[in-house]
Amino acid sequence: ILDDLQWSDELTIELVLGDILEAVFDGKGGCNFLFAGVYRDDNMSNEHPLSAKLSNLRQSQSVHVTDIDLSSFTKRDISEIIANELRLPSRVVSELGDIVHKKTSGHIFYAVELLNALVRDSTIYFSLKTRRFQWCWEKICSLKTSDSVAQFMVSTFSTLEPEVLQMLRLLSCFGLHTDVDVLDILDASCVAPFDGIRTPLQNLSDLGFIEVAGGLVTFTHDLIQQHVYESIELEQRRTFHIEIGLFLGWKVSTSRTSSDASSLEGAVGKMYISESKSQGSVITERSLLSIATDHINHAGPEFVEQSERKSFAIWNLEVGKELSARCDFGCALHYYEQGIAFVGNEVWVDECDTNGKYFCLDLYEGAAEAASAIRNDTKVKHYTNVIIRNVPLDNSLPAWITLISSLESHGRHLEILEKGIKLIQLLNIDIPPPPPSPTA
């Protein structure tokens, strides 16, 4: 018996299935010899050396080949196994069987392993009162998919239908969690499966890849999300993020006029979803604009047309302001910095782009204030100094105040004195000379 033949190289396959079998069978059919080889066909292509060798063996007159397809167990199979072991009717264990099947993807080895673990930790126990096996349903429902099961599920991706696999890739772009309401919005987009999201979503739930509860879609294991996301080519991954971000941004902006229908800036300030969503929904905690902006940021400025970068910088500015208003300064700083990355340094030297300088000033001021709130002195200095160098004194006064306040919070009084004197001089305010020393 040889296992995992799909990993064998051409030389090994030729030795085992060629030379050895030819030596055993002399062509007269008089030798009693049983050879069992096990392999995963989902990990093999038609060009694999094992495929060619098996094809030759099936055509051989001296070797009788029997193919046994070992597919995953169905929900009914798992329920019958549990019913036989626990000596209970199938109808009593059907829900337990469904959960075990979902958590193990029908793989009998992992199903047995899981059931043994549930017995060991007394999640499944024998009740002396009822004289039958019972189980703690709360613990059963909160079971997490194990690493080994997640790796097994990852190996079955190639067997998924195209629309189900597309849905899985779409979900992976959101991370471990996705809001169902957001997916409903994306249902009409080009990144969603052609026939809609509901059927593929249900298929993925039945297969155990995801769980849908409380308005959220959650991957059952981070390894699944990670593998799916990394399996998408980088350029296609960025395209996914751009398409998702643009569609979410345009979809929610219902109050725009036809004149700005193609303008990304026209959506700013109008993209906030209603707070009346169901409890547990991600959208109730953050604006849809921030979700759209996250996807644009994942793609990065280098993947966005130069003409669109200013618009996406404004998106980051709006999200940064919203988070600053909530006193979430760490996250706000992230969005301000993303906006700065989109706009670059060219806006400061473009004499014709007055509007660009104003919103760029807002980005740098927001970044400096957020950095000051989290006591990041280095970033406060950087952002305030950029403002002071590039804008007139009147417009840079808030930056001076932020810089001096940051120095004060760190107890750097000599630097405060130096900066204060310099600012007073720039304002052309005369500093009176010190009073004369009293004479003896």
Image: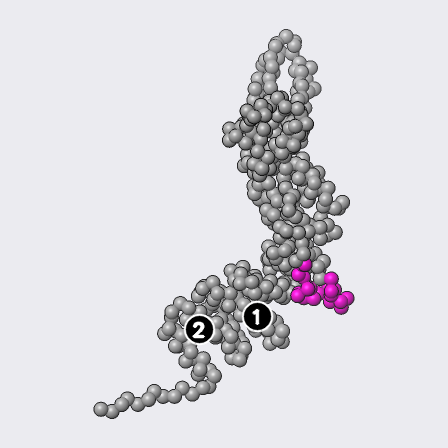
- Name the residue nearer the viewer: 126 or 147: 126
Give the x, y percent position of residue 286.
Answer: 61, 57
Please state which amino acid type lies under the numbered disc 1: Asp
Q: Which residues are magenta?
A: 254-274
Please identify the residue farthest to the front as the structure is shown: 129
Q: Nearer the viewer, mark 2 or mark 1?
A: 2
Residue 185 as seen in the image, left or right of residue 338: right
The residue singled out by tag 1 in the image is 362
Residue 87, located in which quarter of the rendered image? top right
Position of 366 compared to 307: left or right? left
The residue sitting at the top extreme is 30
> Of residues 399 and 218, which is closer to you in this image?
218
Q: Position of residue 50 (x, y in %)?
A: 62, 27
The residue at 46%/82% (across/down) is 426
Residue 404: assigned label: 2
User: Total number of numbered labels?
Assistant: 2
Badge 2 amino acid = Ile
Whole-percent x, y for residue 154 in the image: 60, 37
Quadrant location of residue 228?
A: top right
The C terminus lies in which quarter of the figure?
bottom left
**Badge 2: how crowded within 10 Å, few (<14), some, or many (20+)?**
many
Mark 2–mark 1 contact, CB under 8 Å? Answer: no
The main secondary structure of the magenta stretch is loop
Q: Can you give x and y, in whole percent of width and height, for residue 331 in the image?
A: 54, 59
Q: Image height check: is 52 above or below 295?
A: above
Residue farthest to the left, as pictured: 440
